[in-house]
Amino acid sequence: MTDKYAVIGNPIAHSKSPLIHHAFAEQFGHDIEYTAELIPIEALEAGLDTLQKKGFKGLNVTVPFKEQVWQSLSKKSIHATTASAVNTITFNSDGSRYGDNTDGIGLCQDLTQNHHIDLAGKRILLLGAGGAARGVILPLLSYKPAELIIANRTISKAHHLVNLFDNEVLSASELEQVPGPFDIIINATSASLNGEIPPIPDSSVSAHTNCYDMMYGTADTAFIQWAKTRTAAKTINGFGMLVEQAAESYRIWRGVKPQTQNIIKHLRY
Ligand code: ATR
């Protein structure tokens, strides 16, 4: 019997997740059907109930439902708990639901496995203190960086995350005053959506700095353009992270981890 999965969001038509998951299934000869399901903004719970009743085995969750799903689920992984967001739901055969978050693992996999960027002992600057930033902090810390500095336009939110995660390598900074240069700069703000760049000093980037924008699109984001003109060692958009978070979801659901390299190469923007 075909196992059914879906990504839920609003909007959702643009999602590449069905393509990615079908490519994963092909690697293993798995019989799955993965669809994109538009859920009305005010009807998340009804949407989850309907999909579970229809026999779906699991869901990916995207904007704007990640935090709401996190609130609604009682059983969650440590990654989902610390991220305050769920991007992967498993519908168990006993009717229960389990929430996980694979975004941070996806980011770290893309950095370390696909781009061979070591995180251990490195000075990392994380731009942003919203949901996207929060979700990657625990996985980044697990690689034992020397420093992880969270810089945000609203500094109080950066301090809040530093207090919450309570780790000696973590600190908060104003965007304009980040103490560069850094080995790695990760843009987890939504500034790129408006073609804007967090106002960090040019001295943040040296010739060995790797710059990563968690956003991606057909053209370079404003942050990637900014990093390129400052001759960063490497500039990377978040497409690899998208494929890697999907691979980790697939592993959670089906117990095997798909290969990602070819998919990233063929589908990359
Ligand atoms: P997401 O779930 O994508 O993280 P969010 O929780 O709304 O969305 O967080 C957006 C993040 O992008 C925040 O860190 C926000 O800064 P503020 O906390 O000060 O609002 C940041 N951000 C958005 N636009 C920005 C811009 N033009 N310059 C700098 N930071 C920006």
Image: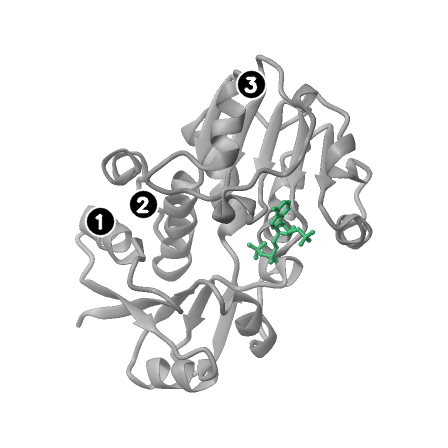
Q: Residue at x 49, y 42 (%)?
A: 195
Q: CA distance from mark 2 to mark 1?
A: 9 Å
- The image quarter in which residue 145 lies: top right
Which image quarter is the N terminus in?
bottom left
Q: Which residue is mark 1?
A: 23
Q: CA distance from mark 3 to mark 2?
A: 36 Å
**Residue 258's mark?**
2
In the rendered structure, the answer to whether residue 19 lies left or right of residue 11 reads: left
Which image quarter is the C terminus in?
top left
Residue 177 locus on image (x, y percent): 78, 31
Q: CA distance from mark 3 to mark 1?
A: 37 Å
Closer to the eye: label 3 or 1: 3
Could you say which is closer to the camera, residue 204 or residue 22?
204
In the figure, 143 relative to 48: above or below? above
Q: Amino acid at mark 3?
A: Arg
Q: Residue at x 29, y 53 (%)?
A: 16
Q: Which structural element holds mark 1?
A: helix
